[in-house]
Amino acid sequence: MSDRVSRRRLITTGLATVAGVSGLAVAAKLAGHYGLIPPDNNGIFGLGESLTYGAQRILLASRHSFAREFNRSEISKVIPVSGPAPETDPFRRYLAGKFAEWRLSVDGLVARPTSFSLEQLKRLPSQSNITHQACEEGWSFIAEWTGVPLSYLLNLVGVRPQAKWVVVYPFDTFWDSFDMADALHPQTVLAYGMNGQDLPTDHGAPLRLRVPRQLGYKSVKYLSHITLTDSLKQVGDGRGSAQPGYGYSWFAGI
Ligand SMILES: Nc1nc2c(c(=O)[nH]1)N[C@H]1C(S)=C(S)[C@@H](COP(=O)(O)O)O[C@H]1N2
Ligand SMILES: [Mo]
């Protein structure tokens, strides 16, 4: 039995236990059918993370699950930064020009590849939510984020039926990806505002993701490009994100 096959068997055993589904055959069928194997499952953290991802997808996909939202009075006074703004071109040039020349390009498996200016994004329907962002290093804060729901933008460009993953590229090396369940989740926002102000430079200007159902590192800052794909195998090192290369899992659900 190959490593891959035994891993899959373990994953499906775990799914059967967690989901309370009786019988391996049913769990195996579910795992395959619903794509419950994360892209980094062959990485060194593969097994544990696959169990987490698969179990969360089974438990949460059945009904809508939301990250907790807070009141304005609960917004944190101290807000740390992780990953200061890139020092490199072209980011510094866009920043110097107040992002007037910056564009978010959206392409790949979409009907209408489009580039959006910040002004155009700000004219789209906006959404604010006050959520908790937790860094894997042990600190966290609550803030209000304002922006365009990613689902709105994706509907605007038209997601092709083959698209399975949304890959996001920032101006630094922190690229990442999301499955359609997280990309289309109502709380997943492309944020240009924070606590009622323009997004501060170090918090991800001009545009960042907020994915409040996952740890802070999935909320990619300094965005430049979004692309939709049916496979992550040819993207980067094939594990869906820069994170597995740093020792963190692709999926960081909380
Ligand atoms: N492009 C980019 N996005 C990033 C990072 C980064 O270094 N570069 N750091 C991540 C990490 S580890 C965390 S915890 C959050 C922190 O967000 P904050 O700096 O706004 O507090 O941003 C995430 N997004
Ligand atoms: Mo983090």
Image (cartoon, rainbow, N blue to C red):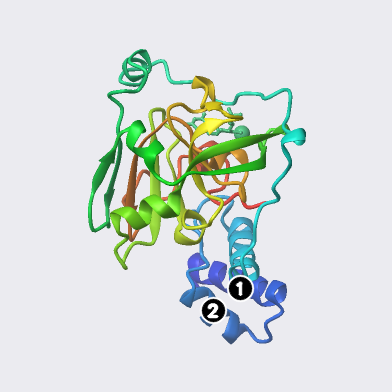
Q: Disc 2 residue type?
A: Leu
Q: Position of residue 13 (x, y in %)?
A: 65, 75
Q: Is residue 173 above or below residue 55?
A: above
Seen at 27% across and 24% down, the residue is 101
Q: Looking at the image, do the residues carrying marks 2 and 1 touch, with CB atoms under 8 Å apart?
A: no
Figure quarter occupied by ligand 2: top right
Q: Position of residue 40 (x, y in %)?
A: 49, 53
The answer to whether residue 179 of the structure is visible from this angle is yes
Q: Position of residue 119 (x, y in %)?
A: 35, 32
Whole-Å distance between the Cαs marked 2 and 1?
13 Å
Among the two numbered marks 2 and 1 on one chain, the one whose residue lies closer to the N terminus: 2
Residue nearest the viewer, comparing 183 with 144: 144
Residue nearest the viewer, comparing 184 with 192: 192
Question: Crowdedness of circle 1 by 10 Å Cα count: few (<14), some, many (20+)?
Answer: few
- According to the picture, the residue beneath numbered tag 1 turns out to be 62
Q: Is residue 36 above or below residue 212?
A: below
Residue nearest the viewer, comparing 212 with 165: 212
Q: Disc 1 residue type?
A: Ser
The answer to whether residue 232 of the structure is visible from this angle is no
Q: Indicate left or right for 163 with 71 as reference.
A: left
Q: Is residue 1 above or below residue 249?
A: below
Report the label total. Answer: 2
Seen at 38% across and 50% down, the residue is 153
Element carrying mark 1: loop
Q: Position of residue 147 (x, y in %)?
A: 48, 40
- According to the picture, the residue beneath numbered tag 2 turns out to be 30
Element carrying mark 2: helix
Q: Indicate left or right for 173 with 10 as reference.
A: left
Question: Crowdedness of circle 2 by 10 Å Cα count: few (<14), some, many (20+)?
Answer: some
